[in-house]
Each structure stands twice: as structure tokens, then as C-alpha cells.
Amino acid sequence: MEKILLAVDGSEHALRAAQYVARLLRGAPQRALHVVHVEEEVPMRSHAFLSQDEIKKMYETESTQRCDKVMQFLKQEQIPHEWHLLVGHPAERVVELAKTLGADTIVLGSRGMGTVGSLVLGSVAMKVVHDAAVPVTIVK
């Protein structure tokens, strides 16, 4: 079964990437969709007064809020998927997950929520393209 890894961050580009994947999946039951959102790690000194459960809940809340449009779209379109919430550097974690899952391709938006990036592609997209061992589709 072909595995597609869709990386989302809550941006409009991520929603368009989800819409692109939905078109790919229509009539293709032999494909499995994995959706990943990566939260940047909060600096350790910020964790000083929080339990591990509170930190986990914080990441889950942030992820849910940021990715709500994509998740609602996938639900509305009745697209089965497996959700992955990771913490760390987004590009590195996306590439690691693709390898772990044995993903056949990665799909992501061309620009994300971050304020830092190049003029052509977002910095996360560029790093994923550079580091991934599988084809990467970038959606504008």
C-alpha cells in the first residue's frame, strides 16, 4: 500500500496541500494517508514549572488549534488518515517520520506559518526537499 505523508502547520498553504492530497486519494483506496504536525519545542527553562502531562497537553492544544481547518476538511471529505503530533524541528521530524513509516511521498505547503524563510519556498519546505529520501510535492 502506498503511503502519503502530509505535513501541515495550520497555514493556508497546508490546507491547499490537504486539498491536493484529497484529489489524489479519490478513487485510490490503495493509498494510506498519514498527517503530521510538528510543534517546535518550548525552551527547557519554560518547562520548569510544568509537569510532563501539562507540556503534552500544551502541545496537543496548540496543534489542534493550528490544524483545525485541515482536520475539519479531512473529516468533511471523509478521508481516513492517521494523525501524528511530533515535537522538534519541523523539517527534521517530517523527514524522520517519512523514513519510519516507509512513506512513498511527502506533501506539504510551499510556505508555512513561520516568519523566517526564503523568497521562493519556506525554510521547512526547502529542508524537507533537501533531506528527504522520497519524492516531495510542494503545493502553492
Image (tube, helix red, strand yellow):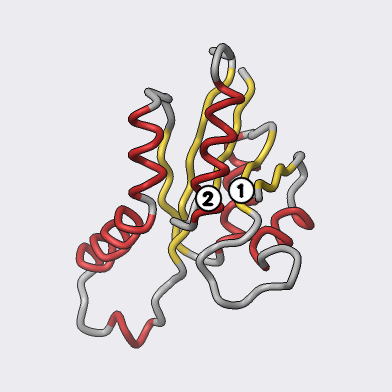
Q: Which residue appears at 72% of the width and 72% of the height?
A: 118
Viewed as shown, does residue 95 lie left or right of 49?
Answer: right
Kindly identify the amino acid type of the residue bearing the numbered disc 1: Leu
Name the outermost residue toward the bottom: 45
Circles 1 and 2, Cβ within 8 Å, touching? The answer is yes
Kindly identify the amino acid type of the residue bearing the numbered disc 2: Ala
Viewed as shown, does residue 134 lie left or right of 18?
Answer: right
Rendering quarter of residue 75: top left
The image position of residue 73, as x and y in percent, is 39, 36
Q: Which residue appears at 31% of the width and 84% of the height?
A: 46
Viewed as shown, does residue 45 lie left or right of 30?
Answer: left
Q: Is mark 2 on a helix, strand or loop?
A: helix
Look at mark 2 in the image and give the residue it sits on. 14
Earlier along the polypeptide chain: callout 1 or callout 2? 2
Look at mark 1 in the image and give the residue it sits on. 108
Q: Give the number of the disc on residue 10.
A: none
Q: Is residue 34 above or below residue 84?
A: above
Viewed as shown, does residue 47 lie left or right of 138?
Answer: left
